[in-house]
């Protein structure tokens, strides 16, 4: 925490953007430093996530699509047919909602990830766009908190570059 709190604003913002791609979110958390402990930082991050404007959410979701990673769930063990179905579901989701599918998989066992992601996409494809933006926003908040906790607790040197 100390290194994060003491980092210059640009380095702190850059580290936070790796957790959530909203500049407004990252600036808000940077501006409110120092945080006494990880719990305070996570609480502030959660509150800032709830305050994202539609444009901030769009920015954060767009940032997720640029992350250099395979489609969510594609690294999970499973049959070729299941992976083909997952690719098709991701494509259908992006075509319907205009952004990548996000879901927090914290605590999901690797052997359950493919089924969990596929099931979640299929369920959420039935949502109307406004309802889905709310769900995507909450999932993005959960993902950002997980990333932030990992960044500060496990890799404090990256939070202070």
Image: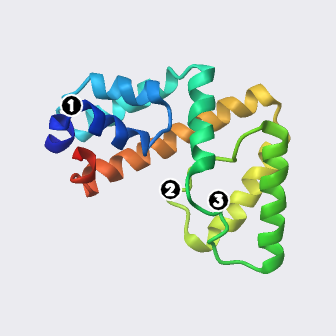
**Residue most toward the front?**
10
Callouts 1 and 3 close, C-beta under 8 Å: no
Residue 83 falls left or right of residue 23: right
Pointer 1 or 3: first along the chain: 1
Vertical arrangement, residue 96 with respect to residue 78, above or below: above
The residue wearing badge 3 is: 72
- SS at mark 3? loop
Q: Residues within 10 Å of mark 3 (few under 14, many from 20)?
A: many
Which comes sooner in the sequence, label 2 or label 1? 1
Indicate left or right for 86 with 5 as reference: right
- Between the residue at mark 2 and the residue at mark 1, the CA separation in whole angstroms equals 24 Å
For disc 2, the marked residue is 106
Q: Residue at x 63, y 72 (%)?
A: 76
Q: Earlier in the sequence, mark 3 or mark 2?
A: 3
Dot 2: within a 10 Å radius of its alpha carbon, few (fewer than 14), some, or many (20 or more) residues? few
Quadrant into which the N terminus falls? top left
Residue at the image position 21 percent from the left and 40 percent from the top: 4
Residue 61, image quadrant:
top right
Expressed as whole percent of the image width and height from the top left, the position of residue 92 reads: 85, 50
Across and down, in percent, residue 13 comes to 34, 35
Q: At x 18% / y 35%, what residue is drawn?
A: 5
Residue 75 sits in which quadrant?
bottom right
41 vs 95: above or below: above
Which residue in the structure is indicated by mark 1? 35
Give the foreground label among 2 and 1. Answer: 1
């Amino acid at each position: 925490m100390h290194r994060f709190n003491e980092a210059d604003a640009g380095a702190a913002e850059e580290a936070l953007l790796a957790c959530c791609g909203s500049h407004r979110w990252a600036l808000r958390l940077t501006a409110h430093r120092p945080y006494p402990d990880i719990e305070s930082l996570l609480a502030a991050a959660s509150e800032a996530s709830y305050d994202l404007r539609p444009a901030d959410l769009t920015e954060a979701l767009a940032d997720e699509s640029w992350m250099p990673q395979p489609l969510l769930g594609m690294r999970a063990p499973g049959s070729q047919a299941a992976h083909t179905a997952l690719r098709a579901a991701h494509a259908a989701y992006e075509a319907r909602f205009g952004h990548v599918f996000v879901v927090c998989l914290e605590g999901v066992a690797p052997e359950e990830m493919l089924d969990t992601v596929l099931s979640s996409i299929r369920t959420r494809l039935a949502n109307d766009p406004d309802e889905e933006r709310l769900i995507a926003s909450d999932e993005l908040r959960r993902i950002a908190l997980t990333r932030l906790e990992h960044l500060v607790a496990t890799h404090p040197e990256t939070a202070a570059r």
